[in-house]
Structure formats: structure tokens, C-alpha cells
Image: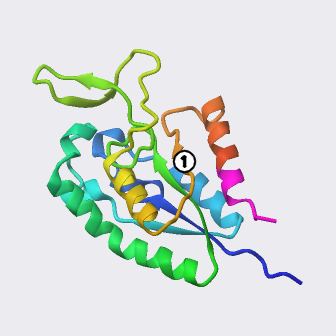
């Protein structure tokens, strides 16, 4: 009888611990419960890395755009935070677990998967608020931490889907349904 497949995913911390989110955006515990319940009911292990925004700037930080985080200092900080989770990934893979995917957060300047055009303030600094023009998402531009994570996985020869939880969309929206379909496809056992 074949052994049951053992699966893990990487996830940004605010999807498990909503207190890490920027204070003015509020916490979404029902969404965190939905994500963790979904994965744990399917026996999918969760590896989360520490929130780079919280560990760099604390809980009472102001919301910022990707542009403000895109510095050599913040990138170095992100790389440091990924050291232990990447060791864990390597250890799980060595022991025949399958890394299924990474789940980031919509509109996060650090953990978002599709960062697009955002409003700019009078000082020419990018805002965390998306631009109102349709089609403003750049599928190639990731949040800073998601970008670095992709580089680290690539360096290890690991390719997995990068999925983005559409936290700003209602639970019954097409966008949210597509997200759960993509997660199901990623975590479904490989025949």
C-alpha cells in the first residue's frame, strides 16, 4: 500500500496571525481561520516566516507602498528572515515532503504576488492604495519578500505556484472562488 503523501506550504505570517497587519487595516480573524482550517483539514503542514514589516518597523507602522520598502536594508532584512524557513523547506524536502505552493496576501507591498500601479502622493511617493485605472496589476512584479522568496526557492531549484489570497474581495466573489480552486489544485495529492 503506498504511503500517504506528506505536503507543506509556505505562507506569509499575517494569514495566520492577523495582528501583524498594518494597524489601520484591521485584523481579519475569520479569514485566518478559513485559511488554516482549510489546510489543516487536508493535512497540509504550514511553514510561515516572520512578518518583515512588523519585524522591521513594529506594529504601529503606517501603511506604505512597495517603493518605500524597496531598499537594500529592507531586502537584507527579508533575506535574514527567510534563513530558518528555507532550512525547514530543505529539511522537509529531504524527508520526502512536497512543497505545494506559497500563499501571499493581495495588495501587500512585501508579500503580494501581483503588485500593480498604485496612487502617488504629492511628494511622488507610492501609496499603498491601488490606482483606480482598470488593469493596474503587473503580474511580473511581486512584493519585496515574495520576490526574494522566489529567488531563494529558485536558487534551490524549487518551483511552486505563488498564490495570492484576495483578502479585499468578498468571500462569495469569483476572485475568491478562483483562489480556492488554485489552492485545491496545488495541494491535491499527486497520483
Q: Which of the image's four quarters has the N terminus?
A: bottom right
In this image, 16 relative to 95: left or right?
Answer: left
Who is closer to the viewer here, 65 or 29? Answer: 65
| Residue that numbered label 1 is attached to | 163
Across and down, in percent, residue 48 comes to: 45, 66
Is residue 28 in view from this perspective? yes
Residue 186 inside the magenta-drawn segment = yes
Across and down, in percent, residue 183 comes to: 65, 51
In this image, 49 relative to 34: left or right?
Answer: left
Across and down, in percent, residue 84 comes to: 37, 76
Magenta segment: 183-191
Q: Mark 1 Cα within 10 Å, few/some/many (few <14, many 20+)?
A: many
Residue 184 inside the magenta-drawn segment = yes
Who is closer to the viewer here, 61 or 109? Answer: 109
Q: Farthest residue in the left direction?
A: 123
The residue shown at (16%, 29%) is 125
Determine which quarter of the picture holds residue 179: top right
Across and down, in percent, residue 152 comes to: 39, 64
Q: Secondary structure at mark 1?
A: strand
Determine which quarter of the picture holds residue 3: bottom right
Amino acid at each position: 500500500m503506498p504511503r500517504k503523501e506528506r505536503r507543506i506550504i509556505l505562507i506569509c505570517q499575517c494569514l495566520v496571525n492577523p495582528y501583524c497587519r498594518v494597524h489601520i487595516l484591521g485584523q481579519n480573524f475569520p479569514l485566518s481561520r478559513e485559511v488554516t482550517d482549510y489546510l489543516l483539514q487536508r493535512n497540509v503542514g504550514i511553514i510561515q516566516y516572520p512578518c518583515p514589516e512588523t519585524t522591521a518597523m513594529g506594529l504601529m507602522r503606517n501603511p506604505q507602498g512597495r517603493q518605500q520598502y524597496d531598499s537594500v536594508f529592507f531586502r537584507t532584512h527579508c533575506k535574514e528572515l527567510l534563513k530558518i524557513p528555507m532550512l525547514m523547506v530543505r529539511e522537509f524536502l529531504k524527508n520526502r515532503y512536497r512543497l505545494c505552493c506559497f500563499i501571499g496576501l493581495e495588495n501587500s507591498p512585501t508579500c503580494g504576488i501581483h503588485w500593480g500601479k498604485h496612487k502617488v502622493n504629492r511628494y511622488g511617493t507610492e501609496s499603498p492604495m491601488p490606482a483606480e485605472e482598470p488593469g493596474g496589476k503587473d503580474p511580473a512584479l511581486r512584493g519585496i519578500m515574495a520576490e526574494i522568496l522566489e529567488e531563494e526557492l529558485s536558487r534551490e531549484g524549487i518551483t511552486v505556484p505563488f498564490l495570492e489570497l484576495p483578502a479585499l474581495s468578498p468571500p462569495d466573489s469569483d476572485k475568491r472562488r478562483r483562489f480556492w480552486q488554485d489552492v485545491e489544485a496545488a495541494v491535491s495529492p499527486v497520483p
